[in-house]
Amino acid sequence: MFAAFGRHLQLAIASVVLCASVLPTLAADPPPNLVIIFCDDLGYADVGCFGSTKHRTPNLDAMAKQGTKFTSFYVTSGVCSPSRSSLMTGCYPKRVGLHQNEVGGWVLFPGNKTGLSPKEVTIAEVLKAKGYATAIVGKWHLGDQPAFLPTRQGFDSYFGVPFSNDMGQTDRPKPYRYPPLPLMRDEKVIEQEPDQRYLTKRYTQEAIKFINKSAASNRPFFLYLPHTMPHWPQYASEQFAGKSKNGKWGDTVEEIDWSTGQILKSLKDAGVDGNTVVVFMSDNGGATRHGASNAPLRGAKGSTWEGGQRVPMIVRWPGKVPAGRSVDAMATSMDLLPTFAKLAGTSAPTDRIIDGKDIRPLLLGDEGAASPHEAFFYYYRGRLQAVRSGQWKLHIARRDPIRRQRGKFRDVPAQLYDLESDIGESKNVAAEHPQVVKRLMAHVERARADLGDDAVNRKGAGVRERGFVKDAKTLTSK
């Protein structure tokens, strides 16, 4: 009996010792740092690993080899403000009221009365509640009134331009100038009409300072780096200006590649590279009239063709995200909020509809991982124009106003494309697949009931109020 008791005692002691040795290991595995590098108007094929033959992007190409490319990654709009609202909230722009400004413009402009509602919960607020240090360095474009600024939306600090770099005076004839372009630190304008040649370098320096400070404090951090470039007007520092094979556009892309390399190097130097998720992407399709390439996609910035909303996306997390892999499953910018929340040990808000999904299985390369989206909807200024489900994309039959012909319209028939065999949307197969059209139209009707559709004067039951102030003022004066 005593021998048996002794054996049980030894097992109990061994179990305690084992637990004591395992628990510190578990406790030593902190939540990952999270970085989003967000370009403005970068085209689908503007970086080497996505097919560019004009731009030298060695750092992004290396990042793709060390991580994973997403080749069917979507943003929710072909233009800036709506797209950024989805990244911040995990929702379609229609749901949060930022599909257009208060006068029907498709983005926000200096002094607009509308912006991202303070009632929304941003990705920064989700992470800050879990103890993350949060910073944005670059372009905000979700409202320039005090209530809408990043520091009121979950970010500890802000350095950058609050809207597009063409919304100032640089390169604009006098009749079309806005008040001087503001460069801000937190909520204060520190410069007017900053020298745009150095914006990318200054953003990079600020981002690295934040990384070093956060790493030194052993605090997890979220860095949002929305570059001003390559949006028009394009500017690059002397190190890159005039050096690419694609004019000013290529110069800015190659400097952004350099910047990405500097960010990745700083993570290694700070000793946090192995525990940092870095996502690189664009806010919408490339502006082809300025030099972008969206090949082999059809369309460009501003459209609901693939070239307007399918963007290059690379994710890197050494040892966690498989290296050298390409994923073609459909994912969206809305997915980053719920995914990052889970990685940080929390969840997306549960008191409201969040359209994004947790895509950790896709990121981490889980066997059998598939897109969590049954359907994805393409909106243009509040009008539902297309839907994708699986391999199929349906452009809805509609009446479009004829440009520069007031009161005249043209009928556009339904168009169905098989994106697996026809990524360029060149062959309409609606007549051959009426049942597919019918199935996708069922998704359309559900979206109209939920999000609404201005094209058919349908209000959505799931739409929330946008931010609004009565007495809006510009940050600078003419």
Image: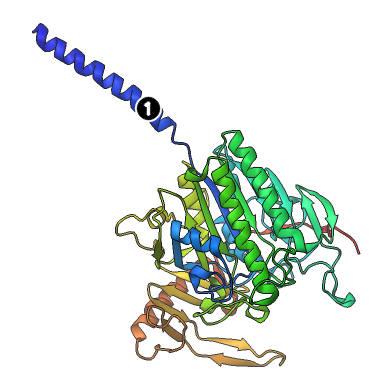
- As helix, strand or loop, the secondary structure at mark 1 comes to helix
| Most distant residue in the left direction | 1
Is 267 situated left or right of 144 in this image?
Answer: left
Is 11 situated left or right of 178 in this image?
Answer: left
Residue type of the residue flagged with mark 1: Leu
- Indicate the position of residue 216 as horizontal and vertical percent values: 61, 35
Which of the pair 240/437 is nearer the observer?
A: 240
- Indicate the position of residue 158 as horizontal and vertical percent values: 71, 49
Which residue appears at 44% of the width and 80% of the height? 423
Classify 10 Å Cα crowding around label 1: few (below 14), some (14-19), many (20 and above): few
Which of the pair 187/215 is nearer the observer?
A: 215
Is 222 situated left or right of 172 in this image?
Answer: left
| Most distant residue in the right direction | 478
Which residue appears at 63% of the width and 79% of the height? 288
- Indicate the position of residue 30 as horizontal and vertical percent values: 47, 36
Which of the pair 280/415 is nearer the observer?
A: 280
- Indicate the position of residue 354 as horizontal and vertical percent values: 51, 56
Residue holding disc 1 = 23
In what quadrant of the picture does the C terminus appear? bottom right
Residue 99 in view in this figure: no
Is 120 situated left or right of 101 in this image?
Answer: left
